[in-house]
Amino acid sequence: MDERLREDEAVDDLQNGYFIIQKKNAFRYGVDAVLLSDFAEIKQKHRVVEFGTGTGIIPILIYARRKPKKIIAIEIQADMADMAARSMKLNRLEDVVEVRRMDLKEAPALLGKALYDCVVVNPPYVKKDCGINNPEETKAIARFEILCNLQDVVQSAKELLQPGGKLFMVHRTDRLVDIIYEMRNVGIEPKRIRFIHPSAGKRPNLLLVEGARGGNVELKFMDPLYIYDESGNFTEEIQRIYGRVK
Amino acid sequence: MDERLREDEAVDDLQNGYFIIQKKNAFRYGVDAVLLSDFAEIKQKHRVVEFGTGTGIIPILIYARRKPKKIIAIEIQADMADMAARSMKLNRLEDVVEVRRMDLKEAPALLGKALYDCVVVNPPYVKKDCGINNPEETKAIARFEILCNLQDVVQSAKELLQPGGKLFMVHRTDRLVDIIYEMRNVGIEPKRIRFIHPSAGKRPNLLLVEGARGGNVELKFMDPLYIYDESGNFTEEIQRIYGRVK
Protein backbone atom coordinates (compact mmCIF):
# COMPACT_ATOMS: atom_id res chain seq x y z
CA MET A 1 0.00 0.00 0.00
CA ASP A 2 1.25 3.45 -0.92
CA GLU A 3 0.65 5.25 2.32
CA ARG A 4 1.33 8.75 1.01
CA LEU A 5 -1.44 11.30 0.97
CA ARG A 6 -2.91 11.99 -2.48
CA GLU A 7 -2.95 15.52 -3.80
CA ASP A 8 -6.71 15.98 -3.32
CA GLU A 9 -6.68 14.65 0.25
CA ALA A 10 -6.22 16.25 3.65
CA VAL A 11 -5.64 14.84 7.13
CA ASP A 12 -8.11 16.13 9.70
CA ASP A 13 -7.56 15.92 13.44
CA LEU A 14 -10.60 14.36 15.13
CA GLN A 15 -9.52 15.89 18.49
CA ASN A 16 -9.79 12.51 20.17
CA GLY A 17 -6.28 11.26 19.51
CA TYR A 18 -7.22 10.05 16.04
CA PHE A 19 -7.01 11.44 12.53
CA ILE A 20 -8.93 10.93 9.32
CA ILE A 21 -7.98 11.27 5.69
CA GLN A 22 -10.70 12.96 3.68
CA LYS A 23 -10.99 14.33 0.18
CA LYS A 24 -10.57 18.07 0.25
CA ASN A 25 -13.77 18.76 -1.68
CA ALA A 26 -16.08 15.87 -0.88
CA PHE A 27 -17.08 13.24 1.66
CA ARG A 28 -16.39 15.17 4.79
CA TYR A 29 -18.19 13.21 7.45
CA GLY A 30 -21.50 14.44 8.74
CA VAL A 31 -23.47 14.57 11.94
CA ASP A 32 -25.19 11.27 11.05
CA ALA A 33 -21.88 9.37 11.36
CA VAL A 34 -21.23 10.96 14.75
CA LEU A 35 -24.74 10.23 16.03
CA LEU A 36 -24.63 6.62 14.85
CA SER A 37 -21.24 6.07 16.49
CA ASP A 38 -22.63 7.39 19.76
CA PHE A 39 -25.91 5.46 19.53
CA ALA A 40 -24.31 2.07 18.83
CA GLU A 41 -23.93 0.34 22.21
CA ILE A 42 -20.82 -1.66 21.38
CA LYS A 43 -18.80 -3.41 24.08
CA GLN A 44 -15.10 -4.24 24.34
CA LYS A 45 -15.70 -7.94 23.77
CA HIS A 46 -17.65 -7.30 20.55
CA ARG A 47 -16.79 -8.25 17.01
CA VAL A 48 -18.34 -5.68 14.70
CA VAL A 49 -18.97 -5.37 10.97
CA GLU A 50 -19.55 -1.97 9.42
CA PHE A 51 -21.13 -1.69 5.97
CA GLY A 52 -20.01 0.96 3.51
CA THR A 53 -17.39 2.61 5.64
CA GLY A 54 -16.48 5.33 3.11
CA THR A 55 -13.62 7.30 4.67
CA GLY A 56 -13.65 5.00 7.70
CA ILE A 57 -14.95 7.68 10.03
CA ILE A 58 -17.44 5.44 11.85
CA PRO A 59 -15.00 2.66 12.89
CA ILE A 60 -12.51 5.28 14.07
CA LEU A 61 -15.14 7.04 16.20
CA ILE A 62 -16.44 3.72 17.53
CA TYR A 63 -12.96 2.47 18.33
CA ALA A 64 -11.98 5.72 20.03
CA ARG A 65 -14.88 5.48 22.43
CA ARG A 66 -15.64 1.76 22.82
CA LYS A 67 -12.44 -0.18 22.02
CA PRO A 68 -14.16 -3.27 20.62
CA LYS A 69 -12.05 -6.36 19.94
CA LYS A 70 -12.48 -6.14 16.16
CA ILE A 71 -14.18 -4.03 13.52
CA ILE A 72 -14.35 -5.24 9.94
CA ALA A 73 -15.19 -2.19 7.83
CA ILE A 74 -16.27 -3.08 4.33
CA GLU A 75 -16.44 -0.76 1.34
CA ILE A 76 -17.28 -1.61 -2.26
CA GLN A 77 -15.44 1.31 -3.90
CA ALA A 78 -11.73 0.69 -4.38
CA ASP A 79 -10.58 4.30 -3.96
CA MET A 80 -12.59 4.77 -0.78
CA ALA A 81 -11.48 1.44 0.67
CA ASP A 82 -7.88 2.40 -0.04
CA MET A 83 -8.27 5.79 1.61
CA ALA A 84 -9.99 4.26 4.68
CA ALA A 85 -7.23 1.65 4.99
CA ARG A 86 -4.63 4.41 4.93
CA SER A 87 -6.51 6.23 7.70
CA MET A 88 -6.35 3.09 9.86
CA LYS A 89 -2.64 2.78 9.19
CA LEU A 90 -2.14 6.45 10.06
CA ASN A 91 -3.88 5.81 13.39
CA ARG A 92 -2.10 2.46 13.94
CA LEU A 93 -5.53 0.85 14.01
CA GLU A 94 -4.94 -1.56 11.15
CA ASP A 95 -4.93 -4.59 13.48
CA VAL A 96 -8.31 -3.83 15.07
CA VAL A 97 -10.04 -2.09 12.17
CA GLU A 98 -9.73 -4.24 9.08
CA VAL A 99 -10.84 -2.45 5.93
CA ARG A 100 -11.95 -4.87 3.24
CA ARG A 101 -13.09 -4.07 -0.26
CA MET A 102 -16.27 -6.03 -0.59
CA ASP A 103 -19.89 -5.94 -1.72
CA LEU A 104 -22.01 -6.14 1.43
CA LYS A 105 -24.22 -8.71 -0.28
CA GLU A 106 -21.22 -11.07 -0.30
CA ALA A 107 -20.16 -10.30 3.27
CA PRO A 108 -21.86 -13.28 4.97
CA ALA A 109 -20.20 -15.70 2.52
CA LEU A 110 -16.80 -14.02 2.83
CA LEU A 111 -16.75 -13.11 6.53
CA GLY A 112 -18.69 -16.02 8.00
CA LYS A 113 -22.27 -16.37 9.13
CA ALA A 114 -23.66 -15.76 12.63
CA LEU A 115 -20.24 -14.80 14.01
CA TYR A 116 -20.70 -11.11 14.83
CA ASP A 117 -22.15 -9.22 17.78
CA CYS A 118 -22.99 -6.02 15.94
CA VAL A 119 -23.49 -4.61 12.47
CA VAL A 120 -23.33 -0.84 12.03
CA VAL A 121 -24.56 0.93 8.91
CA ASN A 122 -25.12 4.41 7.54
CA PRO A 123 -26.62 3.22 4.24
CA PRO A 124 -27.45 5.08 1.03
CA TYR A 125 -30.55 7.07 1.95
CA VAL A 126 -32.32 7.51 -1.37
CA LYS A 127 -34.13 5.02 -3.59
CA LYS A 128 -32.57 4.28 -6.94
CA ASP A 129 -35.37 5.75 -9.01
CA CYS A 130 -35.32 9.17 -7.34
CA GLY A 131 -33.41 11.35 -9.78
CA ILE A 132 -29.82 10.12 -9.95
CA ASN A 133 -27.69 12.20 -12.29
CA ASN A 134 -24.38 10.34 -12.37
CA PRO A 135 -24.84 6.78 -11.18
CA GLU A 136 -21.13 6.10 -11.75
CA GLU A 137 -19.99 8.71 -9.29
CA THR A 138 -18.51 7.73 -5.95
CA LYS A 139 -20.80 10.19 -4.25
CA ALA A 140 -23.92 8.84 -5.94
CA ILE A 141 -23.06 5.29 -4.83
CA ALA A 142 -22.89 6.44 -1.20
CA ARG A 143 -26.11 8.42 -1.48
CA PHE A 144 -28.41 6.37 -3.73
CA GLU A 145 -29.36 2.70 -3.58
CA ILE A 146 -27.39 1.91 -6.72
CA LEU A 147 -25.23 -1.02 -5.61
CA CYS A 148 -27.36 -2.15 -2.66
CA ASN A 149 -30.79 -1.45 -1.25
CA LEU A 150 -32.25 -1.61 2.24
CA GLN A 151 -33.34 -5.21 1.78
CA ASP A 152 -29.74 -6.20 0.92
CA VAL A 153 -28.48 -4.34 4.00
CA VAL A 154 -30.80 -6.04 6.49
CA GLN A 155 -30.48 -9.44 4.84
CA SER A 156 -26.66 -9.39 5.03
CA ALA A 157 -26.79 -8.01 8.57
CA LYS A 158 -29.11 -10.81 9.65
CA GLU A 159 -26.79 -13.46 8.23
CA LEU A 160 -23.66 -11.99 9.83
CA LEU A 161 -25.23 -11.55 13.29
CA GLN A 162 -25.35 -14.12 16.02
CA PRO A 163 -28.79 -14.75 17.48
CA GLY A 164 -29.46 -11.70 19.66
CA GLY A 165 -26.79 -9.70 17.80
CA LYS A 166 -27.55 -6.03 17.16
CA LEU A 167 -27.98 -3.95 14.04
CA PHE A 168 -27.41 -0.20 14.51
CA MET A 169 -28.53 2.05 11.67
CA VAL A 170 -29.01 5.73 10.92
CA HIS A 171 -31.43 6.60 8.12
CA ARG A 172 -33.84 9.19 6.85
CA THR A 173 -37.30 9.32 8.38
CA ASP A 174 -39.02 9.16 5.01
CA ARG A 175 -37.77 5.56 4.81
CA LEU A 176 -39.26 4.60 8.19
CA VAL A 177 -41.82 2.21 6.73
CA ASP A 178 -39.22 0.44 4.58
CA ILE A 179 -36.80 0.19 7.52
CA ILE A 180 -39.29 -1.33 9.91
CA TYR A 181 -40.88 -3.60 7.35
CA GLU A 182 -37.62 -4.97 5.98
CA MET A 183 -36.09 -5.45 9.43
CA ARG A 184 -38.98 -7.45 10.82
CA ASN A 185 -39.27 -9.31 7.53
CA VAL A 186 -35.76 -10.78 7.79
CA GLY A 187 -36.05 -11.38 11.54
CA ILE A 188 -34.29 -8.35 12.99
CA GLU A 189 -36.79 -6.88 15.44
CA PRO A 190 -36.58 -3.11 15.98
CA LYS A 191 -36.01 -2.61 19.72
CA ARG A 192 -34.95 1.00 20.22
CA ILE A 193 -35.62 4.06 18.12
CA ARG A 194 -34.63 7.69 18.35
CA PHE A 195 -35.83 10.48 16.11
CA ILE A 196 -33.54 13.38 15.27
CA HIS A 197 -35.16 16.76 14.73
CA PRO A 198 -33.45 19.90 13.40
CA SER A 199 -34.95 21.61 16.47
CA ALA A 200 -37.88 21.28 18.90
CA GLY A 201 -41.23 21.61 17.15
CA LYS A 202 -39.86 20.55 13.75
CA ARG A 203 -40.53 17.18 12.14
CA PRO A 204 -37.69 14.67 12.46
CA ASN A 205 -35.53 14.08 9.39
CA LEU A 206 -33.21 11.34 10.64
CA LEU A 207 -33.64 8.34 12.89
CA LEU A 208 -31.43 5.96 14.80
CA VAL A 209 -32.65 2.40 15.15
CA GLU A 210 -31.37 -0.66 17.00
CA GLY A 211 -32.65 -4.09 16.04
CA ALA A 212 -31.94 -7.52 17.50
CA ARG A 213 -31.66 -10.66 15.42
CA GLY A 214 -34.48 -12.91 16.58
CA GLY A 215 -35.46 -10.42 19.30
CA ASN A 216 -38.91 -10.43 20.87
CA VAL A 217 -41.39 -7.66 20.14
CA GLU A 218 -40.63 -4.75 22.44
CA LEU A 219 -39.98 -1.29 21.07
CA LYS A 220 -38.57 1.50 23.22
CA PHE A 221 -38.66 5.10 22.12
CA MET A 222 -35.89 7.39 23.27
CA ASP A 223 -36.41 11.08 23.91
CA PRO A 224 -36.11 13.10 20.71
CA LEU A 225 -32.71 14.51 19.82
CA TYR A 226 -32.59 18.13 18.67
CA ILE A 227 -29.62 19.39 16.69
CA TYR A 228 -30.10 23.13 17.17
CA ASP A 229 -31.55 25.15 20.02
CA GLU A 230 -33.73 28.24 19.69
CA SER A 231 -30.70 30.47 19.08
CA GLY A 232 -29.47 28.28 16.23
CA ASN A 233 -26.58 26.84 18.24
CA PHE A 234 -25.89 23.15 18.76
CA THR A 235 -27.96 21.88 21.68
CA GLU A 236 -26.20 20.82 24.86
CA GLU A 237 -26.88 17.18 24.03
CA ILE A 238 -25.26 17.49 20.60
CA GLN A 239 -22.26 19.12 22.22
CA ARG A 240 -22.11 16.29 24.77
CA ILE A 241 -22.29 13.68 22.00
CA TYR A 242 -19.52 15.36 20.04
CA GLY A 243 -17.45 15.50 23.21
CA ARG A 244 -18.15 11.86 24.02
CA VAL A 245 -17.53 10.45 20.58
CA LYS A 246 -14.38 12.33 19.86
CA MET B 1 -85.14 1.64 21.62
CA ASP B 2 -85.64 2.94 25.12
CA GLU B 3 -84.23 6.42 24.74
CA ARG B 4 -84.22 7.31 28.40
CA LEU B 5 -80.96 7.95 30.21
CA ARG B 6 -79.82 5.13 32.52
CA GLU B 7 -79.11 5.87 36.14
CA ASP B 8 -75.32 5.60 35.79
CA GLU B 9 -75.22 7.84 32.70
CA ALA B 10 -74.82 11.57 32.18
CA VAL B 11 -75.27 13.83 29.17
CA ASP B 12 -72.25 16.02 28.48
CA ASP B 13 -72.33 19.13 26.30
CA LEU B 14 -69.55 18.95 23.68
CA GLN B 15 -69.78 22.75 23.21
CA ASN B 16 -70.10 22.32 19.45
CA GLY B 17 -73.87 21.99 19.25
CA TYR B 18 -73.71 18.28 20.06
CA PHE B 19 -74.04 16.16 23.19
CA ILE B 20 -72.72 12.80 24.32
CA ILE B 21 -74.05 10.24 26.74
CA GLN B 22 -71.27 8.81 28.90
CA LYS B 23 -71.14 6.58 31.95
CA LYS B 24 -70.66 8.69 35.03
CA ASN B 25 -67.67 6.72 36.27
CA ALA B 26 -66.02 5.33 33.16
CA PHE B 27 -65.33 5.78 29.47
CA ARG B 28 -65.12 9.51 29.39
CA TYR B 29 -63.53 10.24 26.06
CA GLY B 30 -59.88 11.15 25.94
CA VAL B 31 -57.51 13.36 24.01
CA ASP B 32 -56.76 10.52 21.58
CA ALA B 33 -60.36 10.57 20.27
CA VAL B 34 -60.15 14.33 19.77
CA LEU B 35 -56.78 14.16 18.01
CA LEU B 36 -57.90 11.34 15.72
CA SER B 37 -61.08 13.22 14.78
CA ASP B 38 -59.01 16.25 13.88
CA PHE B 39 -56.32 14.26 12.01
CA ALA B 40 -58.77 12.31 9.80
CA GLU B 41 -59.09 14.27 6.55
CA ILE B 42 -62.65 13.30 5.77
CA LYS B 43 -64.67 15.07 3.06
CA GLN B 44 -68.39 15.74 2.71
CA LYS B 45 -68.77 13.20 -0.08
CA HIS B 46 -67.16 10.42 1.98
CA ARG B 47 -68.68 7.24 3.30
CA VAL B 48 -66.87 6.31 6.50
CA VAL B 49 -66.69 3.27 8.77
CA GLU B 50 -65.53 3.63 12.34
CA PHE B 51 -64.39 0.57 14.30
CA GLY B 52 -65.18 0.19 18.00
CA THR B 53 -67.03 3.42 18.48
CA GLY B 54 -67.60 2.99 22.24
CA THR B 55 -69.67 5.98 23.34
CA GLY B 56 -69.80 7.27 19.76
CA ILE B 57 -67.59 10.25 20.50
CA ILE B 58 -65.50 9.99 17.33
CA PRO B 59 -68.36 9.98 14.78
CA ILE B 60 -69.98 12.91 16.58
CA LEU B 61 -66.76 14.94 16.51
CA ILE B 62 -66.11 13.99 12.88
CA TYR B 63 -69.65 14.83 11.84
CA ALA B 64 -69.60 18.16 13.69
CA ARG B 65 -66.55 19.29 11.78
CA ARG B 66 -66.65 17.50 8.42
CA LYS B 67 -70.28 16.61 7.68
CA PRO B 68 -69.56 13.43 5.69
CA LYS B 69 -72.39 11.78 3.81
CA LYS B 70 -72.44 8.69 6.04
CA ILE B 71 -70.64 7.20 9.03
CA ILE B 72 -71.24 3.60 10.02
CA ALA B 73 -69.99 3.25 13.59
CA ILE B 74 -69.61 -0.34 14.69
CA GLU B 75 -69.30 -1.62 18.23
CA ILE B 76 -69.17 -5.22 19.45
CA GLN B 77 -70.46 -4.62 22.97
CA ALA B 78 -74.25 -4.43 23.22
CA ASP B 79 -74.45 -1.93 26.07
CA MET B 80 -71.97 0.44 24.44
CA ALA B 81 -73.65 0.16 21.03
CA ASP B 82 -76.98 0.94 22.66
CA MET B 83 -75.59 3.96 24.48
CA ALA B 84 -73.90 5.27 21.31
CA ALA B 85 -77.13 4.84 19.33
CA ARG B 86 -78.99 6.85 21.95
CA SER B 87 -76.38 9.62 21.67
CA MET B 88 -76.99 9.79 17.91
CA LYS B 89 -80.73 9.96 18.49
CA LEU B 90 -80.24 12.71 21.08
CA ASN B 91 -78.27 14.69 18.48
CA ARG B 92 -80.71 13.82 15.65
CA LEU B 93 -77.77 12.22 13.85
CA GLU B 94 -79.27 8.75 13.53
CA ASP B 95 -79.68 9.09 9.76
CA VAL B 96 -76.05 9.99 9.06
CA VAL B 97 -74.34 8.10 11.90
CA GLU B 98 -75.56 4.53 11.89
CA VAL B 99 -74.47 2.61 15.00
CA ARG B 100 -74.34 -1.13 14.36
CA ARG B 101 -73.51 -3.84 16.84
CA MET B 102 -70.95 -5.90 15.00
CA ASP B 103 -67.60 -7.66 15.25
CA LEU B 104 -65.19 -5.69 13.06
CA LYS B 105 -63.89 -8.96 11.64
CA GLU B 106 -67.35 -9.48 10.09
CA ALA B 107 -67.71 -5.90 8.88
CA PRO B 108 -66.56 -6.46 5.26
CA ALA B 109 -69.06 -9.33 4.85
CA LEU B 110 -71.90 -7.39 6.48
CA LEU B 111 -71.24 -3.87 5.18
CA GLY B 112 -69.87 -4.65 1.72
CA LYS B 113 -66.34 -4.75 0.35
CA ALA B 114 -64.41 -1.90 -1.28
CA LEU B 115 -67.29 0.53 -0.83
CA TYR B 116 -65.87 3.03 1.68
CA ASP B 117 -63.65 6.10 1.41
CA CYS B 118 -62.32 6.03 4.95
CA VAL B 119 -61.96 3.81 7.98
CA VAL B 120 -61.29 5.45 11.34
CA VAL B 121 -60.10 3.52 14.37
CA ASN B 122 -58.91 4.07 17.92
CA PRO B 123 -58.17 0.40 18.60
CA PRO B 124 -57.33 -1.46 21.82
CA TYR B 125 -53.77 -0.41 22.55
CA VAL B 126 -52.38 -3.33 24.53
CA LYS B 127 -51.50 -6.87 23.50
CA LYS B 128 -53.63 -9.62 24.97
CA ASP B 129 -50.87 -11.23 27.00
CA CYS B 130 -49.87 -8.09 28.88
CA GLY B 131 -51.52 -8.50 32.28
CA ILE B 132 -55.29 -8.38 31.81
CA ASN B 133 -57.16 -8.64 35.10
CA ASN B 134 -60.77 -8.91 34.03
CA PRO B 135 -61.04 -9.94 30.40
CA GLU B 136 -64.85 -9.88 30.64
CA GLU B 137 -65.01 -6.23 31.52
CA THR B 138 -66.23 -3.68 29.01
CA LYS B 139 -63.22 -1.54 29.78
CA ALA B 140 -60.74 -4.39 29.24
CA ILE B 141 -62.28 -5.10 25.81
CA ALA B 142 -61.71 -1.49 24.77
CA ARG B 143 -58.17 -1.47 26.12
CA PHE B 144 -56.73 -4.93 25.41
CA GLU B 145 -56.67 -6.94 22.21
CA ILE B 146 -59.16 -9.46 23.54
CA LEU B 147 -61.77 -9.55 20.81
CA CYS B 148 -59.63 -8.24 17.96
CA ASN B 149 -55.98 -7.53 17.31
CA LEU B 150 -54.15 -5.10 15.05
CA GLN B 151 -54.02 -7.61 12.22
CA ASP B 152 -57.81 -7.98 12.33
CA VAL B 153 -58.21 -4.20 12.30
CA VAL B 154 -56.04 -3.56 9.23
CA GLN B 155 -57.37 -6.62 7.39
CA SER B 156 -61.01 -5.53 7.81
CA ALA B 157 -60.11 -1.94 6.96
CA LYS B 158 -58.39 -3.07 3.77
CA GLU B 159 -61.43 -5.06 2.67
CA LEU B 160 -63.88 -2.23 3.37
CA LEU B 161 -61.83 0.46 1.62
CA GLN B 162 -61.96 1.32 -2.04
CA PRO B 163 -58.60 1.36 -3.79
CA GLY B 164 -56.96 4.58 -2.60
CA GLY B 165 -59.29 4.73 0.41
CA LYS B 166 -57.79 5.95 3.68
CA LEU B 167 -57.27 4.37 7.07
CA PHE B 168 -56.87 6.85 9.96
CA MET B 169 -55.64 5.43 13.25
CA VAL B 170 -54.41 6.62 16.63
CA HIS B 171 -52.24 4.20 18.59
CA ARG B 172 -49.46 3.92 21.13
CA THR B 173 -45.89 4.43 19.94
CA ASP B 174 -44.71 1.16 21.48
CA ARG B 175 -46.80 -0.58 18.80
CA LEU B 176 -45.17 1.35 15.93
CA VAL B 177 -43.45 -1.70 14.46
CA ASP B 178 -46.64 -3.76 14.54
CA ILE B 179 -48.65 -0.92 13.02
CA ILE B 180 -46.31 -0.34 10.10
CA TYR B 181 -45.65 -3.99 9.48
CA GLU B 182 -49.29 -5.06 9.52
CA MET B 183 -50.44 -2.11 7.41
CA ARG B 184 -47.95 -2.71 4.63
CA ASN B 185 -48.52 -6.44 4.90
CA VAL B 186 -52.22 -6.15 4.00
CA GLY B 187 -51.59 -3.48 1.37
CA ILE B 188 -52.39 -0.28 3.27
CA GLU B 189 -49.30 1.90 2.79
CA PRO B 190 -48.56 4.36 5.60
CA LYS B 191 -48.50 7.83 4.00
CA ARG B 192 -48.61 10.36 6.81
CA ILE B 193 -47.50 10.08 10.41
CA ARG B 194 -47.57 12.39 13.38
CA PHE B 195 -46.04 11.71 16.77
CA ILE B 196 -47.67 13.08 19.90
CA HIS B 197 -45.37 14.02 22.77
CA PRO B 198 -46.45 14.96 26.31
CA SER B 199 -44.20 18.00 25.81
CA ALA B 200 -41.14 19.13 23.81
CA GLY B 201 -38.06 17.08 24.62
CA LYS B 202 -40.08 14.06 25.83
CA ARG B 203 -40.42 10.85 23.87
CA PRO B 204 -43.72 10.47 22.01
CA ASN B 205 -46.34 8.15 23.51
CA LEU B 206 -49.06 8.31 20.86
CA LEU B 207 -49.06 8.49 17.09
CA LEU B 208 -51.51 9.33 14.36
CA VAL B 209 -51.14 7.48 11.08
CA GLU B 210 -52.86 7.71 7.71
CA GLY B 211 -52.58 4.83 5.26
CA ALA B 212 -53.88 4.41 1.73
CA ARG B 213 -55.15 1.12 0.34
CA GLY B 214 -52.80 0.24 -2.50
CA GLY B 215 -50.94 3.53 -2.11
CA ASN B 216 -47.42 4.00 -3.43
CA VAL B 217 -44.47 4.25 -1.05
CA GLU B 218 -44.22 7.83 0.14
CA LEU B 219 -44.20 8.67 3.83
CA LYS B 220 -44.62 12.22 5.10
CA PHE B 221 -43.82 13.17 8.65
CA MET B 222 -45.80 15.97 10.24
CA ASP B 223 -44.33 18.30 12.84
CA PRO B 224 -44.57 16.78 16.32
CA LEU B 225 -47.61 17.60 18.42
CA TYR B 226 -46.99 18.58 22.03
CA ILE B 227 -49.82 18.30 24.55
CA TYR B 228 -48.42 20.54 27.29
CA ASP B 229 -46.18 23.58 27.19
CA GLU B 230 -43.39 24.40 29.62
CA SER B 231 -45.84 25.76 32.17
CA GLY B 232 -47.93 22.59 32.12
CA ASN B 233 -50.79 24.18 30.18
CA PHE B 234 -52.26 22.85 26.96
CA THR B 235 -50.19 24.09 24.02
CA GLU B 236 -51.73 26.56 21.62
CA GLU B 237 -52.04 23.84 19.01
CA ILE B 238 -53.98 21.56 21.36
CA GLN B 239 -56.27 24.46 22.18
CA ARG B 240 -56.75 25.11 18.46
CA ILE B 241 -57.55 21.44 17.82
CA TYR B 242 -60.08 21.37 20.66
CA GLY B 243 -61.64 24.54 19.27
CA ARG B 244 -61.72 23.15 15.74
CA VAL B 245 -63.09 19.74 16.59
CA LYS B 246 -65.78 20.86 18.95
Image: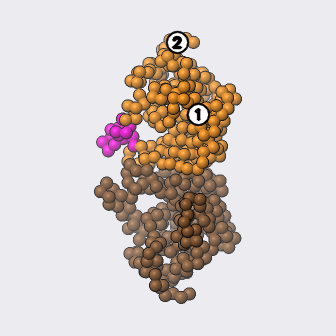
Chain colours: A orange, B brown
Q: Which residue is mark 1?
A: A117
Element marked by disc 1: strand
Q: Amino acid at mark 2?
A: Glu
Question: What span is colored magenta in the figure?
Answer: A226-239
- Is the Cβ of the residue at disc 1 closer than 8 Å to that at disc 2? no
Q: Measured along the vertical axis of the image, is residue B38 above or below residue B17? A: above
Element marked by disc 2: loop
Q: Which residue is mark 2?
A: A3
User: Subunit of mark 2?
Assistant: A
Q: Measured along the vertical axis of the image, is residue B184 above or below residue B138? A: above
- Relative to residue A38, is residue B234 drawn left or right? left
Residue occupying the point 66% across, 36% down: A159
Q: Nearer the viewer, mark 1 or mark 2?
A: 1
- Relative to residue A159, is residue A67 drawn left or right? left
- Relative to residue B29, is residue B98 drawn left or right? right
Residue occupying the point 39% across, 66% down: B242
Q: Residue A28: tell me if it is visible.
A: no
Foreground residue among A218 and B192: A218
Foreground residue among A229 and B203: B203
Q: Amino acid at mark 1?
A: Asp
The crowd level at tag 2 (other Cα within 10 Å; few <14, some 14-19, many 20+) is few
Residue occupying the point 57% across, 34% down: A118
Q: Earlier in the sequence, mark 1 or mark 2?
A: 2
Tell me, yes or no, whether the highlighted magenta stretch contains residue A238: yes
Residue B237 screen position, x and y as percent: 37, 59
Mark 1 → mark 2, Cα distance in angstroms: 31 Å
Residue B174 screen position, x and y as percent: 52, 53
Residue A48 screen position, x and y as percent: 57, 30
